[in-house]
Image: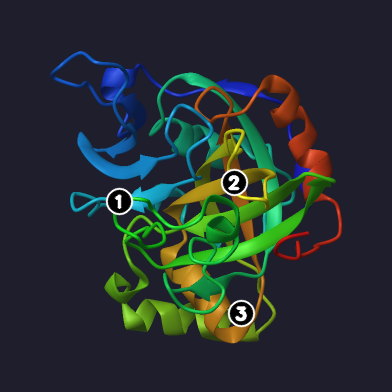
Amino acid sequence: MIEAGEPRRLGVPEAEARLRFEAEQRESGGGPGRRLLVVDGQPAFELSFWCGTCPFLFRRLETAQQKLSLEGVQERLEGALAAPDDDGVIDAFGALLPEGEYLPVLLRVEPRPVVPGRAGDYFSGEQVATWGVDQFWGLPVYPHTPYYRTFETAVGASAHLYEFVVPMVPPTWNERERVEEYVELMGRGEVPTAVAVSTLDVCEPAVGAPDDRYQHWGLTHFLLDGHHKLEAAAATGRPVQLLALLALGEGLATPEDWARLPGLRTRPRSVRATGA
């Protein structure tokens, strides 16, 4: 981590926001529906279920087809930001978000690309070790999107933090020429900046779950800008900056959890051994 700012009020009225968090309405009225991240009025991702005992989740939906890049700040994001409180960048992206409290955090990440079901996949690795496979499908949770892993560390003896960067659209949709431009830029030592809206979900199996029972702190950064930058960084093993706007009112976490996050993000990276 480079630096965390102070929580601040950002956003526009929910009806005007291009991105917002919603609870799906069940026609039967029998309890809450899915937690959703919605872009331009279309459900884009299903998020961890409200109970907090179900497995951590981000799952891309068929209607997730939009990026949220802003042309007016592209030049400023071509290089590194000096601090997380760059008002021009934060205000510009804040205008895409629903009104609420956000914690700006400036990170330096080295993204590692992951394809679901292959080596390094959280959902078929660490998650299965704790929750097992889906009881209906008999398979691991499938997020329907490639994603990036960037960091993990111990929260305590029975909790571990996992960090993910999730593109709004698959990397295969990126423009090849634009990716190569960033490969060249990074080869000259530049560290460009991506921007994300982020959530923190703290999930733990119910009593009686498998023996490997502990809290999974899932820190998820949904890319607003930087799809080509992340792919270029992952391909070359180079870092990028990530300005994360953590939505303090939207995750499955308490104010005490949010307050711990900047400190956790400064810890050395550590991998939790499955079954530890």
Visible in this render: residue 79?
no
The residue under label 1 is 136
Numbered circle sitting on residue 186: 3
Q: Residue 18's spot in the image, x, y percent?
A: 30, 34
Instruction: Inspect the image, locate mark 1, and give the three-letter code of the amino acid beneath it.
Output: Phe
Residue depicted at x 51% and y 78%:
232
With respect to residue 242, does 119 lie above or below? below
In the displayed structure, would residue 201 be above or below residue 117? Answer: above
Q: Nearer the viewer, mark 3 or mark 2?
A: 2
> In the current view of this chain or complex, which residue is farthest to the left?
27
Residue at x 73% of width, y 45% of height: 83
Q: Is residue 105 left or right of residue 42?
A: right
Residue 218 has which mark? Answer: 2
Residue type at mark 2 is: Gly
> Horizontal placement of 156 versus 52: left or right?
right
Instruction: Name which of mark 3 and mark 2 comes first in the sequence.
Output: 3
Q: Residues within 10 Å of mark 1 (few under 14, many from 20)?
A: few
Residue type for callout 3: Met
Secondary element under disc 2, as helix, strand or loop, is strand
